[in-house]
Image (cartoon, rainbow, N blue to C red):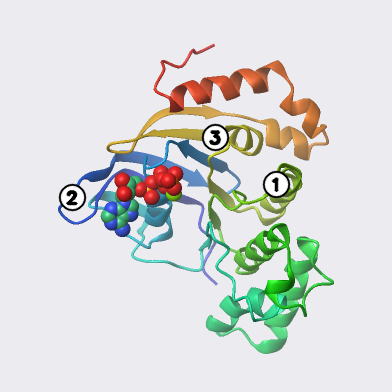
Amino acid sequence: MASRAGSLALSHVSLHYGAGLAVLHDVSLTLARGEFISVIGRSGSGKTSLLNLAGGFVAPSSGQVSVDDRPVTGPGPDRAVVFQDDALYPWRSVRENVALPLKLRGMAPAARAERARAWLAEVGLQDHGDKPIWQLSGGQRQRVGLARALASEPEFLLMDEPLGALDAMTRDQMHELLLRLWQDSHAGALLITHSVEEAVFLSTSVIVLAPAPGHIVHREDFDFGRRFLCGEDPRALKSEPAFIAARERLLAAIHGKEPVHG
Ligand SMILES: Nc1ncnc2c1ncn2[C@@H]1O[C@H](COP(=O)(O)OP(=O)(O)OP(=O)(O)O)[C@@H](O)[C@H]1O
Ligand SMILES: [Mg+2]
């Protein structure tokens, strides 16, 4: 079996749709396995476009997207995507939804049933495998989406606002689950989010995109997620002065004010 990929890179990537306006300009970004990068920025700044490039759903107009040193030419099993709308089959069972991509990849029935069972247990849905999706809550559906993405055991997990529709408490629980899954899977995570607080808490790095055309205006590294995984209390972490200051700096960067370094 081929060795596992180490990093997903966008190198001087620009994108325009048709002959129209540029959507992204000269964006460079490297996501290594074991990193958790969040991308924030105003609506229309090109966040989803960036994720689509990383996923191989669209090709850059210039620059290159690559995994290790191989150019990305389309979607692949090394990069799993969790979309904003959960994109599950509502009439199929939870287990079938998780196992379907494995079936499409030709995995034998017994192996994919076992893989689906294991990942449903990881996200706390071991007792819900037989239920149709339409019987689940929004938070449960998001967990099915995560289990489905992780069941492919991808090197990179790409997520476009996966938690946007959830209430605050469910969101906090999902943050903690997401960090544990990220740690256990050793994947590189790329998260698009509108929540600055979520980005600061979860990420090893946060990138701020400014619009017209989308370009990186700010980048900062954090260790709150790793500290949570080492046993620190999440509420205490989120009320630390350093956390609050980081949130304010990133908000200022999003709204085009000069970020204060220090
Ligand atoms: N398929 C497409 N064809 C033409 N233009 C597009 C296409 N997809 C996106 N765009 C344009 O590209 C720009 C960036 O869109 P994108 O969806 O990447 O932004 P975003 O940062 O994800 O926004 P949001 O926060 O609202 O999700 C927008 O101006 C959008 O209209
Ligand atoms: Mg978007």
Which amino acid type is shown beneath numbered disc 2?
Gly
Residue hosting label 2: 20
| Mark 3 → mark 1, Cα distance in angstroms | 25 Å
Nearest to viewer (mark 2 / mark 1):
1
Image quadrant containing the C terminus: top right
For marks 3 and 1, the one nearer the N-term is: 1
Residue hosting label 1: 167
Q: Which mark is residue 205?
A: 3
Which amino acid type is shown beneath numbered disc 1?
Asp
| Mark 2 → mark 3, Cα distance in angstroms | 31 Å
Q: Secondary structure at mark 3?
A: strand
Nearest to viewer (mark 3 / mark 1):
1
The answer to whether the beta carbon of the residue marked 2 is less than 8 Å from any atom of ligand 1 is yes
Q: Position of residue 53 (x, y in %)?
A: 37, 54
For marks 2 and 1, the one nearer the N-term is: 2
Residue 67 visible? The answer is no
